[in-house]
Amino acid sequence: MEKPMSLDDTSIPGKLFLLSEEDAAVRPSIKPWNQRHPQTAFRMVCLMVILMIYWPLAFIFPRSPFHSQSPIAATGIEEQGICLTPECVHAASEILYNLSPDYKNIDACTDFEELVCGGWRDRHDLRPDQGDAFTGTIMSETSQTLLRHILESDYPGSSAVSFDEIKCHHFVGLDIDQLQHSSFSPVNLASLAESVDEENFDKLKAAYDACLDEDSIRKAGLAPLAELLDTVNHIYPASCLRSQGSSDALSEAVIYLAKLGVTALVASGTGADDRDPDKVVVSVSAPYRIGLPAKELYSDDKVLEKYKAVVHNVFAALYPQKLAHIKESTGAVVDFEKKLAAASPDAEDRDDVTKYYNPMSLKETDALTPDLHISKLVESLSPKDVKTDRVIVMAPQYLKDLNKLISSTPKSVFNTYFQWKIIQAFYPYVEADALTPYRRFVNELQGKDPDSTPERWRTCVNHADDGVGWILSRFFVEKAFSAKAKDLGDQIVSDIKNQFVRKLEKTTWMEEEVIDLAIRKVHNIVQKIGYPTKSPNILDPPSLRDYYKDVKINSSTYFENAASMSTFEVIREWSALGKPVDRDQWDMTVPTVNAYYNPPGNEIVFPAGIMQFPVFDVAVPQYLSYGAFGSVSGHELSHAFDSTGRHYDQDGNYTDWWTDKTVAQFKGKAECFVNQYANFTVEGSDGKPLHVNGRLTLGENIADAGGLSAAFQAWKERAAETPNLGLPGLDFFTQEQLFFVSYSNWWCGKSRRETAIQRIYTDPHAPKWARILGTMANSREFRDSFKCKSREPVCELW
């Protein structure tokens, strides 16, 4: 059940390999002009002067944008070699904004991150409610703003322009494609079920409105949460259990929480069998988060003492009549969590298929933890008509240690533990003073202002995306994605595939038989771009209605909506048992600013959310889109051959298809990346350097290097056919150099120390700045483009 590899992990369930692991929910505040670095303003004045000179020439040398093969090749001033369309001016200004004020005097070969991102840091402040931010955060907020407008407006179908109006009246002579953002729009909805579409929109809007209704949330107070806690107290009461209480009650409590989507003691789920990727299998593992964000934090005495105080204060507010018992029980719960954390696998081992793929029968699994009855958990979550006896036990030693902990822990502790798990899962949906200590603690752990909260509408857009995201995706696609974007995306990904095949053909350290199989794997990679048209088909309102028919949404019951959404996801995941793997499903909704590679599916997936400015734009010179989105594409494709992806063949089977000699060569080259990135550090909580985990981040670092190289070669080949225009105000750089500027712009960001520390412990991606410096050091093409003294890359695989 391998995790799809992605650019940035947003706590996606299962095991995806993401492009980055970032909560890109909010945008950092932007300083006003008079607070930005004066040299930034000077650069913009220069750009405006350039535009004043060149812009009139656009009318002397006109080009029709409706008859060109490339949106850039035939717009702007070709004779001057500069593109002056609004899109190009926007792109140029964005780059100039981000550059260090002193960029002309910085050695690109030694500090490219400062050169490209120095201005970004100058003009972006982290808001009090932010732990970190980067370009992807800003992209996400742009999408969120669009979604807010959608959610706070009436159903758009009633005001839509019809095809008849377009053809017969108002738009004669205009390009119809320019009026239609996507292949699905109210423009062509008449032939579909508009009433169903409006019904879906009403459900989406009800979820958003319930979240915005803070008066009702405050009025409900603790009552909805108390109902869940009362149920736990009934299933596993603290008062009437002897020291050696019933293991059946323990199992029932774990099952109750699991059905709510809350992980306690063990994590369970379903997914593709790594050895048989068309078959759905059950997996059991240690929880990905025990209580604190990272297991290493349980070794920090200051954090642990504060955590104990917080748990105590929350329970003291909930149960003031039990103060004598609370201090002992809450302290015991945190001590129990610490033991669970110590027993759980290290971060670099969690997603290592060679370590976690341990198929067992349910009887064998129960034998590991007899006090928990995992077979009951599986049976309770499985569809009634499906029987399964095979489980992938992802951490056998953890289950053995867990059983010892269960046997040695007073049973009364579990009552408090189960309640605490529910509080941690559902506290965001409650407004009550009793939970304030935990809210503040969560913020403090990330270095945020303890009392800060995001603007409410941001929280509610995320809530709608989490709960009914495919309906939201349907309306996002209509506004933010076009057929031209889909075509360019397909072109870029196909170009990357071709270049990777060429890299494999030229590889000298792999044996020929492995190269042949690797080339087949590249050709067999499925590329999904933009949005899904199956499971569900977001272009088909009845498909969306049927998908979410069991999600109960009311515009005045925020907590209950959240519980219904969570329960629905559990049922949906487990309902896959007994059926073939649905290869049409996506693991990210369309507005998501991320991408991923899924090893068992051998697929790369790019939601429309990441195909936005400044990462992707059909109307700017292609070295920008190939530099950013092309590198994203190459990154995800490279995951197919990194330290994890190499274990999967062209059909997604976990198997040893590399020869021993090739594996040995790979490991030697991979060790270079491990050592290289381990030299990057952030400031630890004690003020000393905290090193990046080169082994945890290995797969992502290999993917960054391979993806950038393939994207550069793909762009060069395209540019040889259709030369690109330059950008105004950026004549200091060659087009080759701007390719690398575009790549690095995507990773411009900043982070609070506490958040950076947590990411070192848990994130399989290196810090953003290290992803620029490390990748540039490993790029032969970069070092050639900037004429570095040493042209050889530090580490190289592809």
Image: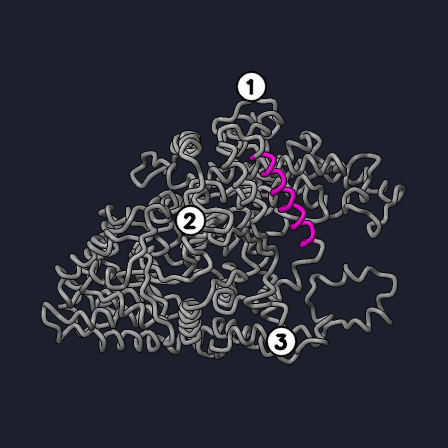
Give the mark, 3 or 1, whose residue is nearer the N terminus: 3
Q: Please identify, in this view, whether the residue under mark 2 or under mark 1 is nearer the observer.
A: 2
Position of 765 with respect to 292 (left or right) is right
- Residue designated by label 1: 789
Q: Secondary structure at mark 1?
A: loop
Tell me whether circle 3 and circle 2 mark residues in contact (CB < 8 Å): no
- Residue designated by label 3: 197
| Dot 1 crowding, Cα within 10 Å, few <14, some 14–19, many 20+ | few
Tell me whether circle 3 and circle 1 mark residues in contact (CB < 8 Å): no
Quadrant location of the N terminus in the rendered image: bottom left
Residue 489 is a magenta residue: yes
Position of 455 with respect to 613 (left or right) is left
Residue 654 disc label? 2
| Dot 3 crowding, Cα within 10 Å, few <14, some 14–19, many 20+ | many
Residue 767 can be seen, yes or no: no
Q: Is residue 658 above or below residue 294?
A: above
Give the mark, 3 or 2, whose residue is nearer the N terminus: 3
Q: Please identify, in this view, whether the residue under mark 3 or under mark 2 is nearer the observer.
A: 2
